[in-house]
Image: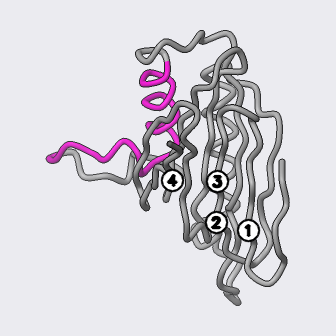
Amino acid sequence: METVIKVGIADMNIVSAPNTIRTTGLGSCVGVIVYDSSQPLAGLAHIMLPDSSIAKNSQPINKSKFADTAIIELKSRLIHAGSNPRKLKAKIAGGAEMFSFSSANEMMRIGPRNVEAVKSALQNENIQLVAEDTGGKSGRTIEFNPESFILQIRTVNKGITEL
């Protein structure tokens, strides 16, 4: 029986077929799917911020929240579950600019900064980015099927696309 594994904000999980994995409410956040192209196994992280350096040092950080820590953790979980690190590929969606600001302050551009940080983290972990649907000003919901490797993206007011 097929189950949809749901991933919340600043959360991650892995899934194997016939189950699928989904996250909702991607605005400036980036949904990262990392999957093993040789078997029906995938993980999803709902990343909120680009860099863990802003986290307070006195508490353990939520690794799922930041691009620089989430990609490493997701890769580790997939390898622990039996994935071949050389077969890992990624698809990403999200990173919208949900609000317009009159200032040109780079810190306020969270969506684009998240996308850049995710791409950098994937490259650092030698995970090939094969598809993306990022930017814009609309929220997204994504669902990945680890058997077909299809990422379905529902974008507010724009319908459904597949990567």
Please tell me how many numbered marks the rendered image carries.
4
- Is 38 situated left or right of 130 in this image? left
Point out the tag, 4 or 3, that comes first from the N-terminus. Answer: 4
Q: What's the residue at 20%, 42% (across, down)?
A: 60
Gap between marks 1 and 2 measured at Cα: 5 Å
Q: Estimate how packed mark 2 is, as few (under 14), some (14 to 19) or many (20 or more) residues with alpha carbons within 10 Å.
A: some
Disc on res. 143: 3
- Tell which of 63 and 86 is nearer to you: 86
Type of amino acid under label 4: His
Which residue is identified by label 1?
Answer: 154
* Residue 65 locus on image (x, y percent): 41, 51
Tag 3–tag 2 contact (CB < 8 Å): yes
Gap between marks 4 and 3 measured at Cα: 12 Å
Q: Which residues are magenta?
A: 58-78
- Tell which of 109 and 84 is nearer to you: 84
* Residue 115 locus on image (x, y percent): 68, 52
Q: Secondary structure at mark 4?
A: strand
* Residue 119 locus on image (x, y percent): 70, 39
Give the colouring mode of the picture.
one colour
* Nearer mark to the viewer, of 4 and 1: 1
Q: Secondary structure at mark 1?
A: strand
Disc on res. 46: 4
Tag 3–tag 1 contact (CB < 8 Å): no
Image height of 117 relative to 99, above or below: above
Residue 88 inside the magenta-drawn segment:
no
Tag 2–tag 4 contact (CB < 8 Å): no
- Tell which of 4 and 31 is nearer to you: 4
Q: What's the residue at 72%, 20% (across, down)?
A: 37
Which residue is identified by label 2?
Answer: 141
Gap between marks 3 and 2 measured at Cα: 7 Å
